[in-house]
Amino acid sequence: MATQPALVCDFSSVLLSLSRVREFVDPLLAQALELSNDAPDRLAEAMRHSLLAPGKRLRPALVLWSTVACGGSWEFAKEAAMAVEMIHAYSLVHDDLPAMDDDDLRRGRPTCHRQFDEATAILCGDALQALAFETLCQHADPSMAGRWCAVLARAAGAEALCGGQADDLAAESKHAALPVNMSAIESDQLGWLEKIHRRKTGELFCASIELGAIAAGADTQHREALSTYARSFGLAFQIADDILDAQGSEVTVGKRVGKDADRGKLTFPSVIGIEKSLIRAESLAQQAVLSLECFGDRGTELAMLARWIVERDH
């Protein structure tokens, strides 16, 4: 019987690995934003403000590390790593809008609509989404570009990211009058919440992993293992994010905290409590790590990330 990998994380190693990802990806993102004079200065500035803001670059990291796990190289997956961060940045710009979550702080700086204006923020998100697919199409292999576009478009669409966000907004009123101390109601809320976040947050993580696997020409076994990892990782991330919103500080998290409770929003801590939420996140992280067994040492960075994601403080 194969030995199960220990769920141990050296935080300094994870942060160093993420730093290397940023050093690789950020100059590429900056270069992609060297737009012609046809792009209005204010719009271009808003795009730079949103895309180049300090961030962990988790999604590009998942692209690059899944590529390595399958025997590929970063260089062959760079367009995918760039594009998924553009989609993520676009989603944050729109998510922060007054009609959505109405946030004024993101990644330690004013949100796009606060720094500029609401119309500019909407157009900034639109432009970043378009730039993501333009970037994918710059890959030398047209068939690779086409497969990538299909994966990312699905993850950003009505059945995934956008649909999850729509249901997340609806959930604020859907369960507002229901008591949360009844087991049947709790089960209903938890199922609804997981359905929302597997789409709103999880699908883009799954796409990141799939883009990397495609870049490396991964076989079916490795793609299925990575898919299992991504599903567990994505939900663990969201639970940890909910816990941070409930317990974290604005300085370390880089965005306004406590807003979910203020709005009566459905979250994992509000449904099952902090302690059960943490246990659930740790269990999902364990599942993610176990799914990487077939990759051996090539899956080390993915495994460490899964552990770190539930124990981080920002």
Image: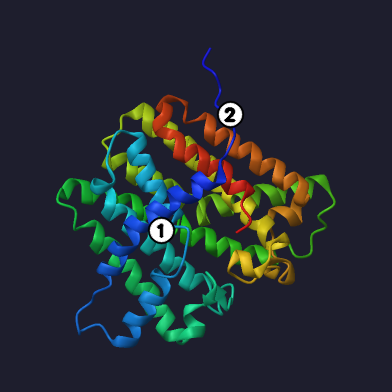
- Crowd tier of the residue under label 2, counting other residues whose Cα lies within 10 Å: few below 14, some 14–19, many 20 or above: few
314 and 98: which is toward the camera: 314
Q: Contact (CB < 8 A) between labels 1 and 2? A: no
- Give, as a three-letter code, the residue at label 1: Ala
Residue 41: x and y in percent read: 30, 87
Please identify the residue farthest to the right as the structure is shown: 181
Q: Is residue 149 visible?
A: no
167 and 151: which is toward the camera: 151
Looking at the image, residue 293 sits to the left or right of residue 189; the answer is left
Q: Residue at x 39, y 57 (%)?
A: 22
Residue identifier under label 2: 6
Looking at the image, residue 44 sits to the left or right of residue 279; the answer is left
- Crowd tier of the residue under label 1, counting other residues whose Cα lies within 10 Å: few below 14, some 14–19, many 20 or above: many
What kind of element bears circle 2?
loop
Q: Quadrant for residue 124, please give it.
A: bottom left
Looking at the image, residue 245 sits to the left or right of residue 2; the answer is right
Q: Is residue 34 above or below residue 133?
A: below
Q: Is residue 15 visible?
A: yes
Quarter the C terminus occupies: bottom right
Q: Residue at x 33, y 54 (%)?
A: 81
Tell me which colouring the rendered structure shows: rainbow
Looking at the image, residue 280 sits to the left or right of residue 37; the answer is right
Q: Residue at x 41, y 58 (%)?
A: 156
Q: Residue at x 53, y 33 (%)?
A: 289
Residue 156, numbered circle: 1
- Give, as a three-letter code, the residue at label 2: Ala
Residue 256: x and y in percent read: 63, 72
What kind of element bears circle 1?
helix
Residue 210: x and y in percent read: 36, 43
Mark positioned earlier in the residue sequence (1 or 2): 2
